[in-house]
């Protein structure tokens, strides 16, 4: 493998070959309980754990079926974000809600919007304008007061913050909790994930807030190709989360 080639090219060269599309038709149908499922040549499409790819949300299943129908000549999961999100909801989130919530709360002290810059002044002001709006909303609407810090000092949240966040997470339905954990992973922020799930911010706003520091550095020092590619992928994934949440209603 040529080490001088860009990372994305090296990854593509070492990735396993994608399976060819072997199904001819894609459809969806509802059962007697009103659960819609994707069908490939009349047979149920399955999640990685061999569970039917199904939902009560017809609009979501239509969109998932369209992803499967768009695969040609190979099936590439990277081009099927709604399918991946639904499979995660079915295989991991729905049957393991408590474990998902417990895991999310372990990151309560690492929320990216709680780590502010002491300087320069323009970066500090950008952070305040973007992040404090979210923090103020959490306090006003959900009685969650986030503790912020400057520099490398750890931001330890007050003892009562985690129980309040737990209650908020437990109120989410399976699709919302799935969207939340996906957004939190992409942004390194529980606060931004809450804001996205509750439609306080758009996916574009969420991305801009999550990568505020990095984009500031790009303005000052220029762009890095690999970092740009990574950010574009994450922006696309956040857009998929936003669409998934909207279609799951």
Image (cartoon, grey):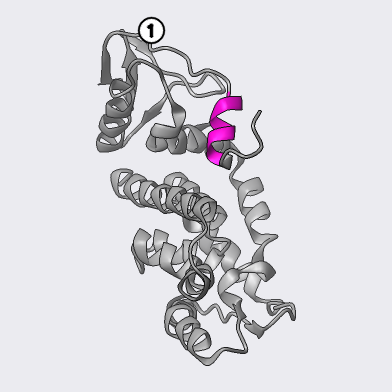
* Residue visible at 58% across and 61% down in the picture: 188
Q: Is residue 234 placed above or below 111 in the rendered structure?
A: above
Q: 39 left or right of 136? A: left
Q: Pick the residue in front: 17 or 180.
A: 17
Q: Is residue 105 visible?
A: yes
Image quarter for residue 36? Answer: top left
Q: Is residue 126 placed above or below 23 in the rendered structure?
A: below
Q: Pick the residue in front: 47 or 233.
A: 233
Q: Residue farthest to the right?
A: 153
* Residue visible at 53% across and 50% down in the picture: 226
State the SS at label 1: loop
Q: Is residue 30 visible?
A: no
Q: Is residue 16 placed above or below 240 in the rendered structure?
A: above
Which quadrant would the N terminus be assigned to in this image? top right
Give the magenta-colored segment's residue range: 8-15
| Residue 11 falls inside the magenta stretch | yes
The image shows residue 65 at horizontal and vertical percentages of: 30, 26
The image shows residue 75 at horizontal and vertical percentages of: 41, 20
Q: 197 left or right of 221? A: left
* Residue visible at 62% across and 83% down in the picture: 148
- Badge 1 is on which residue? 22
């Amino acid at each position: 493998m040529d080490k001088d080639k860009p990372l994305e090219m090296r990854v593509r060269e070492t990735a396993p070959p994608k399976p060819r599309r072997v199904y001819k038709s894609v459809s969806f149908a509802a059962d007697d309980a009103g659960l819609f499922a994707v069908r490939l040549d009349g047979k149920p499409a399955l999640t990685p754990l061999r569970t039917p790819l199904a939902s009560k949300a017809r609009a979501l299943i239509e969109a998932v079926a369209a992803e499967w129908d768009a695969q040609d000549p190979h099936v590439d999961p990277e081009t099927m974000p709604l399918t991946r999100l639904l499979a995660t909801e079915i295989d991991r989130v729905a049957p393991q809600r408590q474990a998902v919530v417990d895991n999310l709360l372990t990151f309560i002290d690492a929320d990216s919007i709680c780590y502010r810059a002491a300087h320069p002044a323009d970066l500090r002001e950008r952070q305040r304008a973007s992040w404090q709006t979210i923090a103020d909303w959490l306090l006003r609407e959900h009685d969650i007061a986030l503790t912020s810090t400057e520099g490398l000092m750890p931001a330890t949240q007050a003892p009562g913050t985690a129980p309040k966040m737990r209650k908020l997470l437990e109120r989410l339905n399976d699709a919302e909790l799935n969207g939340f954990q996906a957004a939190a992973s992409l942004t390194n922020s529980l606060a931004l994930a809450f804001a996205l799930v509750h439609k306080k911010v758009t996916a574009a706003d969420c991305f801009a807030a999550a990568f505020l520091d990095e984009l500031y550095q790009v303005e000052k020092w220029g762009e890095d190709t690999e970092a740009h590619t990574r950010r574009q992928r994450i922006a696309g994934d956040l857009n998929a989360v936003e669409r998934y949440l909207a279609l799951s209603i």
